[in-house]
Amino acid sequence: MQFVRDRKLKRKDGKKYFRDPIRGYIEVSVPELDIVNHPLFQRLRRIKQLGLAYYVFHGAEHTRFGHSLGTMDIANSILNVIPEINEDVCKKISLAALLHDIGHPPLSHALETCIRDILGVEGHEEYTKAIIENTSIRDILTKHGFSNNDIEDIVGFILGHHIRFPLGAQIIHSELDADRLDYLLRDSIFCGVKYGIYDLDRLLISLRPHESKLVVSQKGIYAAEGFILARYHMYVQVYIHKTKCGFEVMAREIFKELVEKNLIEYPLPSSGNLEEELLDKDDIWFFSELRRVYKSQESSERLKKLIKMLLYRKPLKMVEEARAYYSVGERSVSEKFALLQHLKELKPVLQDFEKNEIEENEVFVDRPSVELKQKPYYLRATAEEKEEALPIFVMNRDGKPIDIAEIRDSPIRDIAAKRLEIVRVYTFKEKEKDVRNIIEKRITNR
């Protein structure tokens, strides 16, 4: 089913359609088209949606560009069922959906923790805010009649600050937002897996406004459950796949050393020249820098080794893994999990490394985790407002909205309050046997 926007902007001239493999034809308004044609948005064509996932799922070559268009299209489909939101707010929500990922670093989420830990930047949202407020993107919005308050509203929707417009805010920031609705289907199809497939059409026609909340009708409950389970399965099977995560470990190690040794520069959101500095910061730039550094005399042998492995798809070896599945708030992990989690902090293990000529930085510990109910998702309120949780609401048989995770006969209830934590230990191929023996010895001794 192809959804058509009811709220058409007054634009008989300049209308544009993008042919999208997931959403079909996506209609783009004149202001939106000017944003899409901006070099900073075109940069998203060169940032893969799933970072290094294509090293495992070779079809995962799709980009943040297509996802951003798809998110906007789904946001507009949702807006069609909410007559309570006026035309001006709809335009801002549509632009917020389009712009929500414009600040992503190269390799998408793979380098996000590096940006935070090394540069002290909270995440790509900080860059998104700075781009909208301090680059010529703002000039485009101003040209099309958006005021300073309107631009503040667009940023607010992206950051989850818009508790004043809870219906609109849920479209951008909730457990059932346009972002998630797009990326699950898009990632699933491009990865060639079925885990992320759910009934989007049924879900969209089941949405209803109710007392400032966006809820799913009684008939749409199964579609909502399918969406939540699809999200969980995609995390377990794709997003935290062991080989994919191993390559991301390498990418983070490389990026960290490159920045710390001033071999590359990455701008801060506060940079006075952000637009020019960010234009080429994409996947192509990152891999070009890897080739340059690899050939130079500046890099260490370890760095060269990691770069070569990443360039030519030579994965780290996972030597051990442990999982903990527990109720949120009641964390309980096995002794093996605790050992692996703190492996590089244990003096006997470090002594064993030294005896076997294993450098500490040749062993890598990764900690991916999954929550089915990933928040409760909160809109961040100002001092005068009260924070509001935005879970997935469904209408019960009495016509009242209820969190889907609290429905007694729903399978979601039994697993929504659970958290899956994984700890994995990786090393280089030539060290695999020795590291495995050291870990097995410690596990046995405990």
Image (tube, rainbow, N blue to C red):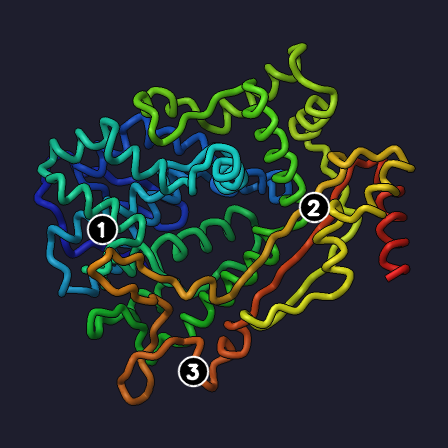
User: If you read the primary sequence from the N terminus, does the residue marked by circle 2 or circle 1 appear first?
Assistant: 1
Q: Residue 288: give x, y in percent of width and height.
A: 55, 19
Mark 1 touching mark 3, by CB under 8 A? no
Residue 79 visible in this rendered orientation of the protein: no
Q: Which residue is mark 3?
A: 407
Answer above or below: position of 406 versus 333: below
The reply, left or right, for residue 101 in relation to residue 57 is left
The image's mark for residue 365 is 2
- Name the residue at 85% across, 58% down: 443
The three-letter amino acid code for the residue at tag 2 is Val
Residue furthest out toward the bottom: 398
Residue furthest out toward the top: 297
Q: Which residue is mark 1?
A: 93
- Name the residue at 84% across, 35% down: 358
The three-letter amino acid code for the residue at tag 1 is Ile
User: If you read the primary sequence from the N terminus, does the residue marked by circle 1 or circle 3 appear first?
Assistant: 1
- Quadrant for the C terminus in the image: bottom right
Task: State the separation of the CA atoms marked 2 and 1.
Answer: 40 Å
Q: Quadrant of residue 352?
A: top right
The three-letter amino acid code for the residue at tag 3 is Ile
- Looking at the rendered structure, the secondary structure element under dot 1 is helix
Q: Residue 325: give x, y in percent of width and height.
A: 64, 68
Residue 437 visible in this rendered orientation of the protein: yes
Q: Residues within 10 Å of mark 1 (few under 14, many from 20)?
A: many
Q: Nearer the viewer, residue 203 or 388?
A: 388
Task: State the separation of the CA atoms marked 2 and 3.
Answer: 38 Å
Question: For the residues carrying marks 2 and 3, which lies nearer the camera in this image?
Answer: 2
Q: Residues within 10 Å of mark 2 (few under 14, many from 20)?
A: some
- Name the residue at 61% across, 53% down: 368
The reply, left or right, for residue 68 in relation to residue 234 is left
Q: Nearer the viewer, residue 93 or 370?
A: 370
- Looking at the rendered structure, the secondary structure element under dot 3 is loop
